[in-house]
Image: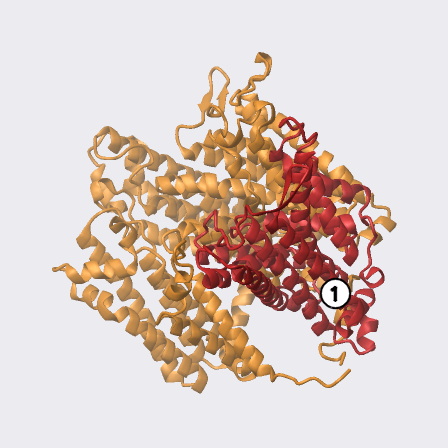
Amino acid sequence: LTDFLNYLMLGLTRGSMYALIALGYTLVYGVLQLINFAHSEVFMSGAFGSFLVVHAMVGDGKDVSGAEQVLVVLVGLAVGALSGAVVAYALERVAYRPLRRRGAPKLAFLISAIGASFFLSQLFGKLFNRLGNNQFPDYLNKNATLFTVFGAQVKLLQVVIIVAAVLLMIFLDRLVSGTKLGRGIRATAEDAPTAALMGVDIDRTISRTFMIGGALAGAAGFLFGSAFVFTNTMGFIPGIKAFAAAVLGGIGNIRGAMIGGLLLGVAENLIPTAPWVGGHAWIGQEWTDVVAFVILILILVFRPTGILGERLGRAA
Amino acid sequence: MNQRRTVPEWAGRAVACFVGAIVLALMVGPQQGSKNDYGLTFREQVLNPRIIAFLVVGALVFLAITYQDIVRRYASRPGVRPLIVGVLVLLASYFLMRWYDPLGNNGKFAGFADAVGRTGGIAPLAKVFFGWLWWVSLLVLIVGVFVAIARKLRWLGWASAGFAVVVGVIALLAHAAASGAGGGIDHSFGAPTAFIGYLVIAGAGVLAARSNAETAATREFVERVMAFRPGLPLVAMGLVLGLLALLIATWFAPQRNNATLVDTSKLFSGSDASALTTAYLGWLGYVLFVVVLVLGAAAVATGQRMLGYVATAAALIASLVTVITLHDISTTAFRAGAGAGPWRDLGTGGWLLSIAMFSIGSGGFIAARRAPVRGRSVMVGGATSPKAGRLHEMGASTTTISIALFGLGLALFYPPTATGFWQQALVTDIGVYVLLAIGLNVVIGWAGLLDLGYIAFYAIGSYTTAYLTGSLPVKPPSWLMMSPLWAIPFAIAVCLLAGVLLGAPTLRLRGDYLAIVTLGFGEIIRIIAVNNPGNFTNGPRGVASAVPHPVINLGFFRIEWGGNQLQYWYLLLVLVALLVFLFYRLENSRLGRAWAAVREDEVAAQATGVNTTRVKLLAFAIGASTSGLAGVFFASDIGYFNPQNFILNNSILIVAFVVFGGMGSLTGAIAGAAALTWLPDFLRDQVPSEDRVMWIGAVLVIMMIFRPEGLIPARRRKAELSGLAGHDTSVDQDLRAVPAGEGV
């Protein structure tokens, strides 16, 4: 049970990050019916952007007081979100809008997004020396345990990540269902030409949607960076898993993406490590990624509409 | 909605241009980041005086966009385009290409010019050219031609053109003088390229000097000649190349001595070279060239079928004789203790002449194919007989065929005299990826399915070969052990099976889902190879023992590959030619048309009775088996490989090759793969190899924005991708119905 709980916590931690990234996929899919392949690089840029600021704030991360810790988390989230939003905005302007104006077929969008994704990841690699093991300053003491349940240690960092992610998701849910911008997004998702006739500025809405998704992914990048090592190619695996999560919950469906992310995170950590006792797993942890991909393929083949079904307009 | 504050449009544009300039500054330049100082790169690349150059570029782009009406008015004048091309060619020759091989990496213009400046006893003309004339002439020509174009100054145009020709000749002479003083083998292309650049600028000057009516008349004349005489450009190019080869080029360079054809003849006059070689060097070479040239020119001029085929045959024989002679030269010299071995120490002359003759022969071939069939008269009203237009109907223009034939000549005759580095690069970097690109072109280009896990089939093919040849920890039963050539059908079958297994459930998915699923599949295969279940793949260390080289042994006839890369190159060429032939037939078959229908509108295709899933599955399977074939080839050529060869980056690279060359166009896929694999090797001391993927990504985005149909587009695809056809029913099309900014 101890192992089970440990893996469950790990799964929830990772899952909450997948959920944050998945929201970006889902939002963009909702308004454009396109999968934003470069979204994983937005996530990556959030990690690097916030890293620069956090590094400047606390240096090596020795002896950080409690108030400072809270400040670092808040600032890190904000800066990560900001860099994510900036990159996502630039992405939309450069790689998507010219094609959209021309009415290009989907294949062109996909290829352009893939190009942008590789460009961004390698550009950041160039900037940060392609190190394989960048780490945030240990401002929160990664091993600090908050409390223990049945011998399983619940780490402070894990709790911070999950809480931050959930708060962000609630914020997004309110944003989409309660504000004028959210109404615009939902209207665009449901029927773009009609929305335009009703006075929604489509270009602006799409651009804002990219920025919101990018901000969430950037914040997730900060959280990911705090917990694990980060590299310029770190976006790829979480990105594709977040996409799997978005599909699992029903792409285009905001709440679905949240649920899907958490489910996928838990599943990919629990399944390979079963039966969680005796230190001998049936599948083995090195197959974690394969499990996630297999889940993705199975969902796509058997239930491409996901758990909660598609449609951004309705479910939010 | 409420009224928003609007930012002036030019402000946004200016910001974009300057941000773009800064990003460009970050992209260019060496790797800088460090773990101790994360701002280092930024400071080195951006807070550096050279940022001014990038900002100037940004400002120029901004001005060009802002005043695009004026710019466009000038840019459309005759002569502007050749001017730009010529300047770019010159810049490439001065900054990218090598001017003198023995200097190593410093054989570029700057290093060579330094060396020339320091050395005494070089002709003063060379000193002047390498000292200052090269950049002064460039500046003078840019300004001169541009002013001539802008102000319509005829005398200036003529003067610039003359000056450009003079400087071009000076460049050639100066290079010859300087490299002659240095001695050593010199295969460099810098000086000839510069010469071509100056000639192009001279052309721009001439265009500027002549009035529009005169230019139009000339152009019309040229077009008329081209239309009447297909194959003429190839013959003309052959003539120029052949003269270069016979008169100037180095044929043999033992002990750092550049010998032209005449010199080589003297070298071998008393040696034990075969009679053929002696004759070739003495007189046969010239005679062969003249015969081929006369035949080819006659075929093109008269348009007679038989004559065209005779010219083709003559060219092939002559090229073959040249190659045999080259081999004999190098082996004879080797035996006499002068050369470094077979196929070594050969200069550019031999292959240049072969390519020249091949190209003339191709001209004759095209002329023959285009010639009307005898006995069937040309129809009234200029329409030719049905047979005459066949090539055209089948979707290949004369230009494309000309390019393809010239490329074939290059592929046949260039490698033997290339340096070892380039032979290796040709086979393992370029050749294998060309094969893969041809296969992926079927999937992406024809069936319109984005397959991002294409490399997985390549991996499966490679590992199948390794298993069947007993190079993995798990050995096959002894009756199943085989040579790599026999493994080809098995590898293809396994890949076919894998393709069908993956495709059958997933091909019903929408395009973007398919992309993700294939991407996941590719990663699964790679992770399996790394994780090594059942100790089958030997994990990240790669195969356990080297995959053997293929052998053909018929008792009396035995070929064993592996001696040098050339053998692999020609095997590869045969495979590629075979596949191109098969796929070319396929493109215009019933299946090819079904692919086009599915690609353009799946619902409509289904409604007209195309079994879409089956058709897509076939494309997938054909692509997968091609990839498997490439895998066999790769495994036996390289011997050792590991899962790192099959990372996602490589899948994306192949997609990039296909897209860059032109989706759906076989010539395009080959050209794209060849160009994009050749460039990094060519620029390997300019651009760090780790940055390769970054540039490729940028190229993909830019291609999709400005030229989605690729370098050598397929006609049908071009219309689809530019998005003008209006048959795309997705939302983006709907969005386009709302003009930007009208939704307020």
Q: Nearer the viewer, residue A208 or B312?
A: A208
Relative image position of residue B135 (x, y in whole percent): 30, 71
Q: In this view, does B371 lie to the left or right of B595?
A: left
Q: Going 66% across and 56% down the picture, which residue do you hit?
A: A110
Q: Position of residue B544 (x, y in %)?
A: 48, 24
Q: Mark 1 points at which residue?
A: B732
Q: Dividing the image into 4 quarters, which one contains the C terminus of chain B?
A: bottom right
Residue B163 placement: quadrant: bottom left
Colour pattern of the rendering: by chain
Residue A1 lies, with reference to residue A21, above or below; the image says: above
**In the rendered view, does B247 fall on the left or right side of A255?**
left
Classify residue A94 by image quadrant: bottom right
Chain that appears red: A
Along the viewing direction, whichever of B282 and B177 lies nearer the viewer: B177
Residue type of the residue flagged with mark 1:
Asp
Q: Which chain is orange?
A: B
Q: Residue at x 63, y 57 (%)?
A: A39
Query: Quick check: B401 above or below B619?
Result: below
Which quarter of the picture shows residue A90? Answer: bottom right
Where B464 sits versus B15, above or below?
above
Res A210 visible: yes
Local SS, label 1: helix
Which subunit holds the residue at mark 1? Answer: B
In the rendering, at what x and y percent does residue B682 appear? Answer: 40, 51
The quadrant of the rendering that contains the N terminus of chain B is bottom right
